[in-house]
Image: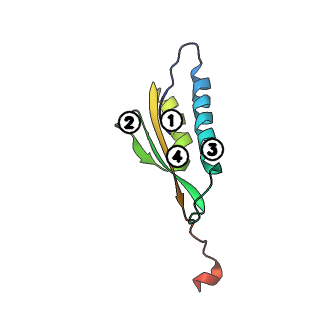
Amino acid sequence: MKKLFLLNQENKKRERVVEAVKHEIRQYIKRERKKKLPDDASVWQFDCLFGKDMASAISIHFNELTPSVDNADTENWDSFYVEILSRAAKKAPKETKDDQS
């Protein structure tokens, strides 16, 4: 997903637009996670970029995406750019107490 979201729209309340943007992002993530993983992968990971426009977008962690949208709303940005790219990855096994000794 590579998209520029406009927060100020005619005949729409800003709060509703912000919630609609978050909903669209969540639905995209949900759709991507439903896709079949390759045999050598165990989880989908997401690479995210966020900024006022495409040129100023910086890499952020997936968990920082919704707070970044809220921050853009708080700072009264007119628009913001979001890029989310999914990739298949192997999940690292968790260490147990037995493994550490």
Question: In this figure, which residue is indicated by the disc labeled 1?
Answer: 71
Q: Is mark 4 on a helix, strand or loop?
A: helix
Q: What residue do we see at 57% from left, 55% from top? A: 44
**For discs 2 and 1, the disc positioned in front in the rendered view:** 2
Mark 1 residue type: Asn
Question: In this figure, which residue is indicated by the disc labeled 4?
Answer: 64
- Of marks 4 and 2, which one's residue comes earlier in the chain? 2
**For discs 4 and 1, the disc positioned in front in the rendered view:** 4
> What is the residue that sits farthest to the bottom in this orientation?
101
Q: Is mark 2 on a helix, strand or loop?
A: loop
- Of marks 3 and 1, which one's residue comes earlier in the chain? 3
Mark 3 residue type: Arg
Mark number displayed over residue 54: 2
Reply above or below: 11 against 64.
above
Q: What residue do we see at 60% from left, 57% from top? A: 37
**For discs 2 and 3, the disc positioned in front in the rendered view:** 3
State the image coordinates of residue 69 (x, y, percent, origin top left). 52, 36
**For discs 3 and 4, the disc positioned in front in the rendered view:** 3
- Of marks 2 and 3, which one's residue comes earlier in the chain? 3
Q: What residue do we see at 62% from left, 50% from top? A: 33
State the image coordinates of residue 65 (x, y, percent, origin top left). 53, 43
- Of marks 2 and 1, which one's residue comes earlier in the chain? 2
Question: In this figure, which residue is indicated by the disc labeled 3?
Answer: 31
- Of marks 4 and 1, which one's residue comes earlier in the chain? 4
Distance in Å between CA atoms under marks 4 and 2 = 18 Å
